[in-house]
């Protein structure tokens, strides 16, 4: 009898708990889109989306004013990737977000004034070429090429920073410097340079991931 | 004696008043004069058969779109020229009329002969304006043959 009483108590408690777990039938927090080209509600002293958009747009437009790049008799072959673009700053940053945006915007804007070589896809292309030549796959529709395209010029550059902090107030200031250089792949001559720099200060730095 | 004293006092007062009028160093910006040159049209935008009421933002000019700096900066010149590759470079000289440093930013939209936007608007480009000094904003177009007009928008950097 006592055992039956215990069991019924546990059953009743279980029912009561189940009754508490109702659906929270309210609207969720709406996603807030912000303009990536302007400062958002979360701001720190590092490189942010508006800086990436501004610097790549600035470099792209500047490269289009360089005659050796934008008005050569034969459009030069350009390689833009992050292989030789180093991040030596104290900002945690995926440098591909800079070089990818620069390559895409320049490729779309150049409209034949330059040709872009996807060196970061070289392995993918080599594998497909090998399959075609082995007869594993057919030759597709585009006529074959002797070899993959070589580059005339390749992007190099560096991101550096200089941090300073006031120990009394906790104020932090960071100077960011981003250098872009286009290098002749035969002579190592730097045929075009661009620099983007800014300094920001804030009471507390935010966390970049 | 009394009349001499009053004459001296009056002259001193006038000098002080005049001094008060010219104490501001260069550059001096007559914001009232600039405002008087603006033409505002009380008409909703895009009425069929009516000219555009957007006289406040004419092409081939720099338009300050931010109340925060509207009466603080002065656009001294706005010019455009062709670069060696055929793109168009817009150059605007901006003067900070205040005693304080300002951070401003601007972007440019380029238009073709039909006054249609011929390419994406440029990204906002920041420039610093130290107190009572000038700085130059530059922007280049992407296209070469499709650029006939431009319009620069300027605002305070936040």
Image: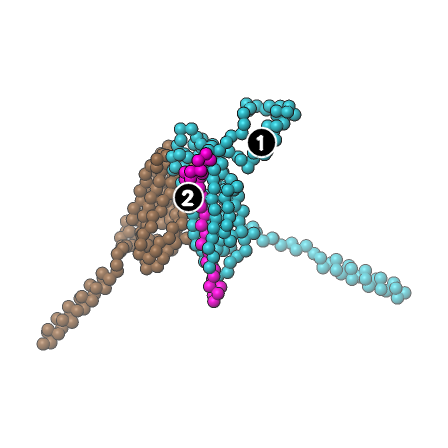
* Disc sitting over residue A194 in the figure: 2
Pointers 1 and 2 in contact (CB under 8 A)?
no
Q: Is residue A41 visible?
A: no
The tag on residue B103 is none
Where is residue A186 drawn, in percent x and y? Answer: 45, 34
Q: Residue furthest bottom?
A: B1
Residue shown at 60% from the left, 53% from the top:
A28
Q: Is residue A5 above or below residue A192?
A: below
Which of the numbered marks, if any, corresponds to residue A125? 1
Q: Nearer the viewer, residue B79 or A143?
A: A143
Is A185 covered by the magenta stretch?
yes
Q: Is residue B118 magenta?
A: no
* Residue at 43% over, 50% down: A197
Q: Nearer the viewer, residue A202 or A40?
A: A202
Mark 1 or mark 2, earlier in chain: 1
- Classify the position of the N terminus of chain B by image quarter: bottom left
Q: Residue A25 is drawn in which quadrant?
A: bottom right
**Part of the protein shown in magenta:** A165-194
Q: Decide if residue B76 is in sight here.
A: yes
Q: Main secondary structure of the magenta part?
A: strand
Residue at the extreme right of the image, as rendered: A1
Residue ID at (31%, 52%): B134
User: Is A199 placed left or right of A138 in the picture?
Assistant: left
B28 relative to B113, above or below: below
Which residue appears farthest toward the left when viewing the image?
Answer: B1
Residue at x 51%, y 48% (from the top left corner): A87
The tint of chain A in the picture is cyan
Chain B pictured colour: brown
């Amino acid at each position: 009898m006592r055992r039956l009483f215990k069991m019924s108590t546990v059953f009743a408690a279980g029912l009561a708990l189940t009754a508490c777990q109702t659906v929270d039938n309210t609207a969720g927090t709406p996603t807030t889109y912000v303009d990536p080209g302007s400062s958002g509600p979360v701001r720190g002293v590092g490189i942010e989306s508006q800086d990436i958009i501004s610097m790549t747009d600035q470099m792209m437009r500047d490269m289009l004013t360089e005659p050796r790049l934008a008005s050569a008799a034969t459009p030069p072959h350009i390689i833009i990737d992050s292989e030789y673009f180093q991040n030596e700053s104290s900002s945690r940053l995926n440098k591909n977000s800079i070089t990818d945006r620069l390559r895409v915007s320049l490729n779309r804007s150049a409209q034949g004034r330059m040709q872009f070589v996807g060196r970061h896809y070289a392995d993918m292309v080599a594998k497909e070429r090998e399959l075609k030549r082995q007869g594993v796959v057919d030759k597709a529709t585009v006529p074959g090429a002797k070899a993959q395209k070589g580059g005339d010029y390749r992007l190099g550059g560096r991101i550096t920073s200089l941090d300073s902090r006031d120990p009394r107030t906790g104020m932090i200031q960071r100077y960011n410097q981003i250098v872009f250089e286009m290098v002749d792949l035969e002579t190592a001559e730097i045929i075009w340079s661009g620099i983007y720099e800014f300094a920001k200060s804030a009471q507390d730095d935010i966390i970049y991931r | 004696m009394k009349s001499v004293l009053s004459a001296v006092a009056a002259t001193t007062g006038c000098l002080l008043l005049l001094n008060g009028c010219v104490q501001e160093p260069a550059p001096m910006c007559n914001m009232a004069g600039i405002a008087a040159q603006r033409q505002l049209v009380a008409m909703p935008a895009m009425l069929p058969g009516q000219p555009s009421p957007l006289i406040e933002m004419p092409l081939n000019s720099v338009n300050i779109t931010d109340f925060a700096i509207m009466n603080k900066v002065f656009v001294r010149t706005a010019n455009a020229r062709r670069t060696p590759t055929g793109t168009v470079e817009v150059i605007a000289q901006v003067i900070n009329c205040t005693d304080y440093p300002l951070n401003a930013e601007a972007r440019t939209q380029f238009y073709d002969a039909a006054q249609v936007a011929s390419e994406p608007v440029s990204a906002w480009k920041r420039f610093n304006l130290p107190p009572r000094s000038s700085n130059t904003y530059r922007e280049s177009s992407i296209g070469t043959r499709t650029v006939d007009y431009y319009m620069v928008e300027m605002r305070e950097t936040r």
